[in-house]
Amino acid sequence: MSAPAILEPVMTALAQEAATQSVLLQLGVISAQGVIDWATDIRQREGEKAAPGIIELSTTPATRLDLIGAALHRLQRESDYWPAVRAALAKAYAFLLVRPDESRRVARALYALASKGFPEVPEDLNFMYYMDDAFVRARAGARGTEDDARLDLLLELAKFKKT
């Protein structure tokens, strides 16, 4: 087997991980420092074999969101968007169990992710379009309560948690 064939699955796995990190950052489930810590862990594990993008990301200041976003973008080039979103949703579920006060903000971010202009949102992710609306309606007193909206969001996200 040639070297590129051996490296390809690793690079694809890294690209998927980077795409998931990017989605988590956009959802506010992890911080810029969390992304840097992720890259630093990989860099320490892989040593000299670490991808240049991982090295770059692990040395980027947490205050430079522009550079972090650009580095993640380069790392995730060979990724599939919707599997990365699904992986991030599993982590968003765990995050909201601990931080239910963040539910409305995460719902807003989910809408933004779904609306990014991708050709079609897969059927199992259509809930991303209407969760923010559930919070808006609850605040307006038009339908249910914010607790109802939080529970609905958690129920949707629970479908993606790892068992």
Image (spheres, grey):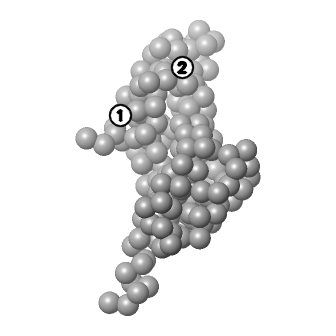
The residue sitting at the bottom extreme is: 2
Q: Is residue 58 rendered to the left or right of residue 1?
A: right
- Residue type at numbered disc 1: Ala
Quarter in which the N terminus is drawn: bottom left
Measured as percent of width and height from the top left, residue 153 is found at: 45, 28
* Residue occupying image coordinates x 39% and y 84%: 5
Q: Label 2: which residue?
A: 101
The amino acid type, in three-letter code, at marker 2 is: Asp
Extreme top residue here? 141
Q: Is residue 156 visible?
A: no
- Is residue 24 in view from this perspective? yes
Asked which quadrant contains residue 93, the reply is: top left
Judged from the image, the secondary structure of the residue bearing numbered disc 2 is helix
- Where does residue 116 sit, x and y in percent of width and height? 63, 50
User: In the picture, which quadrant includes the C terminus?
Assistant: top left
Rendered residue at 53%/25% (across/down):
103
Ranked by sequence position, the earlier of labels 2 and 1 is: 2
Residue at the left extreme?
163
Numbered circle sitting on residue 105: none
Q: Nearer the viewer, residue 34 or 66?
A: 34
> SS class of the residue under badge 1?
helix
Q: Position of 131 compared to 159: left or right?
A: right
Residue 46 percent location from the top left of the image: 44, 66
What x and y, as percent, mark residue 29?
53, 37
Badge 1 is on which residue?
A: 158
Q: Residue at 51% across / 11% down in the picture?
A: 145
Q: Are marks 2 and 1 in contact (CB under 8 Å)?
A: no
Q: Residue placed at 37% from the left, 81% from the top?
A: 6
Q: How many other residues sit within 10 Å of disc 1, few (<14), some (14-19) or many (≥20)?
A: some
Q: Quadrant of residue 105?
A: top right
